[in-house]
Image: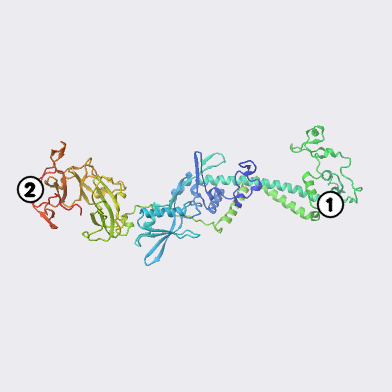
Amino acid sequence: AEAMLEGLDENAVDFRPNYDGRLEEPVVLPATFPHLLANGAAGIAVGMATNIPPHNIAELVDACLHLIKTPDARDDTLLNYIPGPDFPTGGIIVDDRETIAQAYRTGRGGFRLRAKWEVEDLGRGQWQIVVTEIPYQVQKSKLIEKIAEVIQTKKVPILADVRDESAEDIRVVLEPRSKNVDPEVLMGMMFRNSDLETRFSLNMNVLIDGVTPKVCSLKEVLRAFLDFRREVLGRRSQHRMDRIDHRLEVLEGFIIAFLNLDRVIDIIRYDDDPKAALMYEDWSRPHQATIRRATDERDYVSPLLGVDTGALELVDDPEAVARGVLEESAEGGPKIPRRYAGRSEGLSDVQADAILNMRLRSLRRLEELELIRERDALMEERAGLEDLLESEELQWAKIADELKDAKKKFGKDYEHGARRTVIEEAAEIEDVPLEAMIEREPLTVVCSQMGWIRAMSGHIDLTRELKFKDGDGPRFAFHAETTDKILVFAENGRFYTLSAANLPGGRGMGEPLRLMVDLPNEAGIVTMFAYRPGERLIVASAEGNGFVVSTDEVVAQTRAGKQVLNVGDGVAKICKPVAGDHVAVVSQNRKLLVFPLAELPEMTRGKGVRLQKYNAARGKQGVLELDGGLSDVTTFDLDKGLSWAAAGDRTRTEVDMGPWIGKRASVGKLPPHGFPRDNRFTDPDV
């Protein structure tokens, strides 16, 4: 604070009335260091804004000293002294040098600021992450709330807990879900999903001359500060010279008073107008010092004897000037008595006042040598100030000395002088696969007929009897891993994606699937299974249209899912993995058709092609309806034959499928003897 106000009482800056006009305040503060960059600034005005980060004072001073020595220095050279912002809360700036340099060259840009963290070993392979510094202007309480939200929503599933163990220092503990998690992967996800990484925008929009707004580079801001310091130096030096001149004038009067002490005492003691008498007395007469001391008022002879004292009054009277009693000074300043005009033997008004205002006990201290010594010292100081005001080189040298003093006060030896923010380039955060964030563990996914889904630990027996809500029962059950994505295919032709790690645990009845994805109430679930990259699926509608699609094309990134099969007013019916070279289609009117898989196109989205032909028939209401419709589809290897579920948990295989092979979109023939009466190849709910 003292460094910001130094010189304020020495006319270093202009003053203006405050908000109510009762007091005066400085227009700017005469800071001895570049406080605009040191402390930073932020504000929004009409049509403009500014945002400047704080910097290290010692680095700013070094840059200013270099700019004094080399006025044409470039911004890139100044960055050798100022590598970047220095935030009081520390942290790590992870931008590369060119990004930082471009921001300072143009006055616009930004800095990526990350929290500082370390891995704390807990023994036995256990560990935790401790955040010791957080980004600038991030509130710790809100940061912890945000991290807790990330845990609750499972945006970072490998993070188990967050704790605030801070005292005077920052200590935020992040607990991983598993010791096998990579700390770098965990922090990379936290930087992306929380305020452990922020961006500080740079906008050095300032009033460079106090009037005109301008977006300045680093060099322009430092140059403006140095020019301001030179102006402050000139004003302070001139103010000091004025004070010295006043003091020299007083000292000359004191020296005269010391040499003529008895006479001064007589004038003060006996004269009716001692000030005028002191000013009119001719102190240059050789016999002045030998005048006999008056013993009483009768012996005292006033220097004003015979003088019209009315003419000696120091008044501003234009009529007196006109009468010739008073005369203006040569500089057109205050008016002085005409009798004193051009006279140098008497004391000045300032000298007379100083002598009259002296305390009596101070008279004994008026020693001539001391007065002369002080006068000589002041005259020497005044000569130095004159040289300073006349020499630009001396002015910059003085400014450099002041900057060095500021560096000593606020440099490395100062309690808070060392740089706190580390600058180190960091690689961009890459998308981390879910498998890298979650410990791989077996799960059994169970979904009920009413759409309640849960994940039970381990691969349990799928034939085991499970508990469900009253009126509910099993629908889907399959083995998966915690790292798997679960694909859900619905009757509206859309695929929905769930994370197996985010599914509710198996201790309860689970949660409704429709709360996890935007699945319409009227759209039922066709199937669900674990995603396997590169696997091919055959999808088909109840109207008998379908195609082959890769599982890589059906993974959805949002709750809304991904439209794959266009069903129009109909519904999706089939979604099965491709496992063979031929397709078998059976209709509700019990017609079986087999054709090569090669006749079925592979698409990413659409209605598909006709798999089997169905004849139109007149319904009860007179509306044309399909004679049948798609019942089931499967794929198989022709040389191994077609298999289907038979009675008593048996499987029957028909090797010779030649009679049923035909062209795609044909009607087909009745299936072999013993084919299931429900016209399905397998149990649809397993």
Q: Residue at x 80, y 45 (%)?
A: 347
Q: Considering only vertical position in the picture, is 156 above or below 224?
A: below
Query: How many marks are shown on the rendered structure?
Result: 2
Q: Quadrant of the C terminus?
A: bottom left
Where disc 1 sits, the SS reads helix
Looking at the image, do the residues carrying marks 1 and 2 touch, with CB atoms under 8 Å apart?
no
> Which badge, 1 or 2, comes first in the chain's sequence?
1
Q: Could you tell me how far apart the alpha carbons at marks 1 and 2 are, in whole angstroms?
A: 146 Å
* Residue to which mark 2 is pinned: 659
Q: Residue 168, image x and y in percent? A: 50, 59
Few, some or many C-alpha atoms within 10 Å of disc 1 (few <14, some 14-19, many ≥20)? Answer: some
**Mark 2 belongs to which amino acid?**
Pro
Q: Is residue 420 left or right of residue 194?
A: right
Where disc 2 sits, the SS reads helix
* Residue to which mark 1 is pinned: 261
Q: Is residue 143 left or right of residue 328?
A: left
Foreground residue, 558 or 126? Answer: 558
Q: Residue furthest right?
A: 298
Foreground residue, 574 or 440? Answer: 574
Q: Residue 608, image x and y in percent? A: 20, 42
Q: Residue furthest front?
A: 470
Q: Residue at x 23, y 56 (%)?
A: 478
Q: Nearer the viewer, mark 1 or mark 2?
A: 2
Asked whether residue 219 appears in the rendered view, the answer is yes
Q: Residue 341, image x and y in percent? A: 80, 39
**Mark 1 belongs to which amino acid?**
Leu
Q: Is residue 673 left or right of residue 221?
A: left
